[in-house]
Amino acid sequence: MRRDYVDPGYSPIDTDLICEFHIEPAAGISFEEASTHMAGESSIDSWTEISTLSPGLAARLKPHIFYLDANTQTVRVAYSEELFELGSVPQVLSAVAGNIFSMKIVGNLRLQDITFPKSMLREFEGPNFGLPGVRDIVGVKDRPLVGTIVKPKVGLTSEMHAEVAYNAFAGGCDLVKDDENLTDQKFNGFEKRAELTLKVAEKAEAETGERKMYLCNITAPTCKEMVRRLHVLKDLGASYAMIDIVPTGWTALQTLREAAADEGLALHAHRCMHSAFTRNPRHGVSMLLVAKLCRLIGLDQLHIGTVVGKMHGDKNEVLSIRDECVLDTVPADPEQHVLAQDWGGLKPMFPVASGGLAPTMIPDLYSIFGKEVIMQFGGGIHAHPMGTAAGAAACRQALEASLEGISLQDYAKDHKELEVALGKWLKK
């Protein structure tokens, strides 16, 4: 007989880890029964009575379902910190989200959120640089940063890649990064690409008087190789590295956070593949939680969505993710299934808006995100009719117009690159 973990009178204590789930029971199963089985499976229980679970141990470690709402199919569970290896994101996820998605007793199940107690936060260092540190590196304090991805994603030689990067830097980009699927292919090897692109970044710095950052993708088959690539970048004078966070996994990210801190490199987090488990609002894990885990581990900047552009994510969802990146204390938001989180002084991450953006979208991006965002463009720079440098210049001009409260049309009268961009991308 399964224990009943439903305990609406329970008040979570300071050392509890709290999870919020969306649960849709399987046919013939009540909401309360499905919730009880899920809570037990994610903590101390098994599919049948076990003699090795003493009443004393069960009383000490049992989960408490302190909130149930069958109408919204929302459940909140408080877990004792004793159930967790406090400094291990992989173990936490294995515990609260390990087997439960395979249970026949649930139809759909989504881990919406986790609120971490201070006792767990203390085991993590958070971002080494974070938003304020990145601004120090780049030397830009009072505006959004402008970045691009070298396009096409793959196929360019190292020399061609560096040339595209140089044109983007010269045109006005603060940051240039690899895309998610460019690592160490035969046509564009990691070390040669890093060396050549960092050289053109230095050249563009001398010509423009601005700091220019290259974010080289260190994603690799093993943690050992990724750490080696960090060393290579450091020796070449880099300030940054980029990592594909979902394909590499949580253990790799915790390993890289330590190695990057030793090398003094900032880490840019690309969230490719996240929608495989975050996009369905009824099943999987939320992108909000992915962002929280990234800040906990200590990545310095993270793709969060755009609201405008080509990527999935409505405004409320994206802004909730943004808040978890930048705020020190995030209030509860019942509409977005966000639990209150006090980050205990961990540095904020720099949010990155990226995916299908064009210079014409900058006023909307600035209105949505304000100054604390990295606006990252791909085709919106490289498809400019006058070329990559002009595309980067058009983005900077559109940003200048937005900061000054001037319409793009008026600003374009004296800025050719923006004028051409409006002709290409502005909706008629």
Image: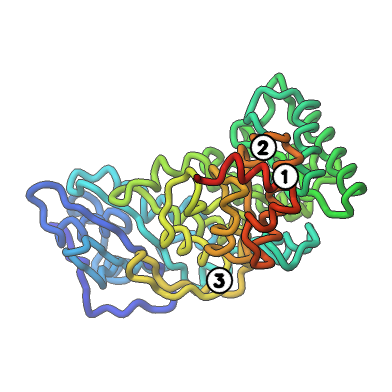
Q: Nearer the viewer, mark 2 or mark 1?
A: 1
Q: Residues within 10 Å of mark 2 (few under 14, many from 20)?
A: many
* Residue 99 sits above or below residue 167 on the image: below
Of labels 1 and 3, earlier in sequence is 3
Residue that extends furthest to the left in the rendered view of this protein: 28
Query: What residue sits 73% from the left and 68% below the top?
Result: 142
Q: Nearer the viewer, mark 3 or mark 2?
A: 2
Q: How far apart in space, not on screen, are marks 1 and 3 (Cα)?
A: 36 Å
Q: Position of residue 188 (x, y in %)?
A: 73, 24
Q: Can you identify the residue that label 2 sits on?
A: 384
State the residue in front, 119 or 59. Answer: 119
- Callout 3 secondary element: loop
* Residue 315 sits above or below residue 194 on the image: below
Q: Can you identify the residue that label 1 sits on?
A: 417
Q: Given contact means CB atoms under 8 Å apart, are the residues at marks 2 and 1 in contact? A: yes
Q: How far apart in space, not on screen, are marks 2 and 1 (Cα)?
A: 8 Å
Query: Which numbered disc covers residue 327?
Result: 3
Query: What residue sits 35% from the left and 77% below the top?
Result: 12
Q: Position of residue 165 (x, y in %)?
A: 76, 37
- Callout 1 secondary element: helix
